[in-house]
């Protein structure tokens, strides 16, 4: 210990920065040399999960005494994870205020204590010019004042927060000129109205809308977007206006609403697409850059959607089919295309089926792809032995003709 204590303060603080804040603080009892070293830490994390009232009081008192006296010239990261009802919202607001005043870069708050959603965010937070990352999760009220700016913010995550009015989200996004990553989770949101995301700089966007949400629709205008994830579980018809995303590389779309024509037209430049949908797709959009397609086939008209996507994706190299819950149902029909899609003949190299049950229509699709995929290198079939006789499945597919003589057929059994 004496040898370690002989190191410089800067080096000791760097060593402490690799430890959880609670452990770093505990080193203060070692000697006077260590008494205040933790107060130079640039990253602070305080967690109170399922603690007793006395434990919460201890943490509250510690933060009240020591946080205003923190000596680091800048707090790079301040993480507060509180899930107990023993903390006064005004105390939390004061702690955040102190962190914001120290050129804060990253702020993460998880709060789930009160039955209502209090305003624990000081107004100065919305004018913090040093803030790069903001992550809020839980019972937190978002009340964005006017005439403010988050000029450095690049990452914003909002999970289950409450918005003071229907314009709060749009007002917040409008003050973030450099925003690149946005995650919006609307669980626990009582009423949202129209969700509008118009951010020219945005590169990654993830939106989750629960089945019981109260929303009027979506408007998305993000011309620089590279990654797009949309989980929309509302079955009732609602508007979905998505502007073109010419730079999109990857998309994950899980939607219940049946009108996805405009959405498909907006993401047609995508290279990787994962799709859950019950939509009856009748459009003629071309996904000429699509190389990877993962499609859920547990819906009635999935085979028709599959044919449309194959016909519109001339450069597809990897195809993954999978099921979720439809163990006992079946697709309505398999309309074998009269002309083999170009991608099957000239570019498809990898074919994978997850949750293969060996039902007649599934077998017909698998056999069709094996029979016509001239460039296929591997075909991997994963089955659940609770629903299928593996030997019968292997025999059926192994004996089917294959256009590619070098194709390796792989069977994986899951229990």
Image (cartoon, grey):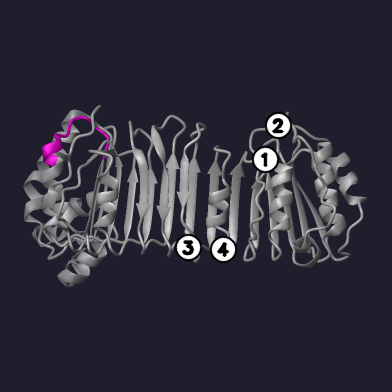
- The CA distance from mark 2 to mark 3 is 34 Å
Please state if 123 lies on the left or on the right of 177 as rendered.
left
Q: Earlier in the sequence, mark 3 or mark 4?
A: 3
Q: Which residue is mark 4?
A: 269
- The CA distance from mark 3 to mark 1 is 27 Å
- The disc label shown at residue 226, or none: 3
Q: Secondary structure at mark 1?
A: loop
Please state if 292 lies on the left or on the right of 353 as rendered.
left
- What is the magenta segment's predominant secondary structure? loop
Q: Is residue 90 magenta?
A: yes
Q: Earlier in the sequence, mark 4 or mark 2?
A: 4
Q: Which residue is mark 2?
A: 327
Q: Quadrant of residue 13?
A: bottom left
Q: Which residue is mark 1?
A: 323
Contact between marks 1 and 2 (CB within 8 A): the answer is: yes
- The CA distance from mark 4 to mark 2 is 33 Å
Q: Residue furthest top?
A: 115
The span shown in magenta is: 82-91
């Amino acid at each position: 210990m004496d040898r370690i204590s002989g190191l410089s303060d800067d080096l000791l603080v760097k060593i402490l920065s690799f430890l959880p804040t609670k452990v770093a603080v505990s080193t203060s009892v070692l000697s006077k040399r260590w008494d205040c070293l933790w107060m130079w830490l640039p990253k602070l994390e305080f967690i109170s999960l399922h603690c007793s009232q006395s434990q919460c009081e201890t943490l509250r008192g510690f933060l009240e005494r020591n946080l205003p006296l923190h000596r680091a010239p800048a707090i790079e990261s301040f993480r507060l994870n509180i899930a107990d009802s023993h903390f006064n919202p005004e105390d939390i607001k004061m702690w955040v205020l102190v962190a914001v005043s120290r050129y804060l870069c990253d702020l993460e708050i998880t709060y789930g204590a009160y039955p209502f959603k209090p305003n624990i965010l000081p107004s100065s937070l919305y004018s913090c010019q040093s803030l790069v990352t903001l992550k809020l999760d839980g019972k937190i009220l978002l009340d964005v004042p006017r005439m403010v700016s988050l000029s450095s913010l690049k990452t914003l995550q909002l999970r289950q927060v409450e918005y003071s009015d229907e314009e709060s989200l749009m007002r917040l996004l409008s003050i973030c000129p450099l925003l690149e990553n946005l995650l919006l989770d609307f669980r626990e949101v009582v009423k949202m109205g129209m969700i509008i995301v118009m951010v020219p700089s945005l590169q990654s966007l993830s939106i989750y809308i629960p089945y019981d949400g109260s929303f009027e629709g979506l408007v998305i205008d993000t011309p620089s977007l590279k990654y797009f994830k949309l989980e929309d579980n509302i079955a009732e018809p609602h508007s979905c206006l998505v502007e073109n995303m010419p730079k999109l590389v990857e998309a994950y779309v899980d939607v219940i609403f049946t009108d996805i024509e405009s959405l498909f037209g907006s993401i047609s430049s995508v290279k990787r697409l994962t799709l859950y949908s019950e939509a009856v797709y009748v459009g003629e959009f071309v996904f000429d850059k699509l190389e990877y397609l993962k499609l859920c086939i547990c819906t009635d008209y999935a085979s028709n959607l599959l044919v449309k996507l194959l016909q519109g994706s001339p450069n597809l190299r990897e195809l993954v089919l999978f099921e979720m819950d439809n163990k006992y149902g079946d697709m309505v029909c398999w309309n074998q295309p009269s002309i083999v899609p170009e991608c099957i003949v000239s570019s498809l190299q990898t074919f994978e089926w997850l949750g293969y049950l060996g039902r007649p229509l599934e077998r017909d699709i698998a056999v069709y792809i094996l029979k016509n995929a001239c460039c296929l290198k591997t075909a991997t079939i994963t089955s659940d032995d609770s629903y299928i006789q593996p030997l019968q499945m292997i025999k059926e597919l192994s004996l089917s003709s294959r256009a590619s003589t070098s194709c390796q057929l792989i069977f994986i059994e899951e229990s």
